[in-house]
Image (cartoon, helix red, strand yellow):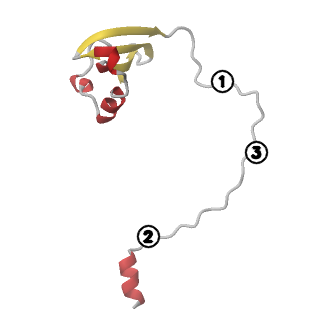
Amino acid sequence: MYKGSPSCPEERRLIPSVEAMSQMSFLEPQIGDSANIMWFFVIEVDEELYADTISLVGFLDGVQVVDYPIQIEGFIPVMASVDKKLKEPIKLDKPAISIKTDKTEKARSDE
C-alpha cells in the first residue's frame, strides 16, 4: 500500500520484502509469470489531501501490467450510528505498579 500515483511508485517499493516473497511462493506454478506480479493498493489524494481514488495495481519486473481504479463516490461516513444496546462497562481495580529491579543486584543485597 502506498500514497501517490499508481504508475509511478518509488523505486524502493518495487523491492519485495521477505514476507511478500513468501506469499508469492504460495501461488501455483501453472499460472506462470502472473505469480511474480507484485500487487499494491494505491491511494491518490486531491489538493486537500483527501482520498480521491484507490487503485489496485500490479507490477511485473518493474513494469505496470494492471491498473484497476476504484472510484470513491459520495459521502463516506467516519462513524455510523449503532442501534444495538451496548453492554455496561466493567470496573477494574488499579494495577499494582512497582520499579523493576535487577535480579542479580537483589540477590547480592539478600546475601
Residue underneath mark 2: 100
Residue 58 visible (yes or no): no
Q: Residue 46: where, in percent of width, then height?
A: 40, 13
Q: Which residue is mark 3?
A: 88
Tell me whether circle 2 and circle 3 mark residues in contact (CB < 8 Å).
no
Q: Please, which residue is most extreme toward the front here?
A: 30
Residue at screen point 57% across, 67% down: 96
Residue hosting label 1: 80
Q: Residue at x 29, y 20 (%)?
A: 36
Q: Which amino acid is tagged 1?
A: Ala
Give SS at disc 2: loop
Q: Which of the pair 15/91 is nearer the observer?
A: 15
State the residue in front, 46 or 11: 11
Q: Secondary structure at mark 1?
A: loop
Left-right relation of 46 to 7: right
Q: Is residue 12 above or below residue 108?
A: above
**Vertical relation: 37 (above or below) 20:** above
**Circle 3: element type:** loop
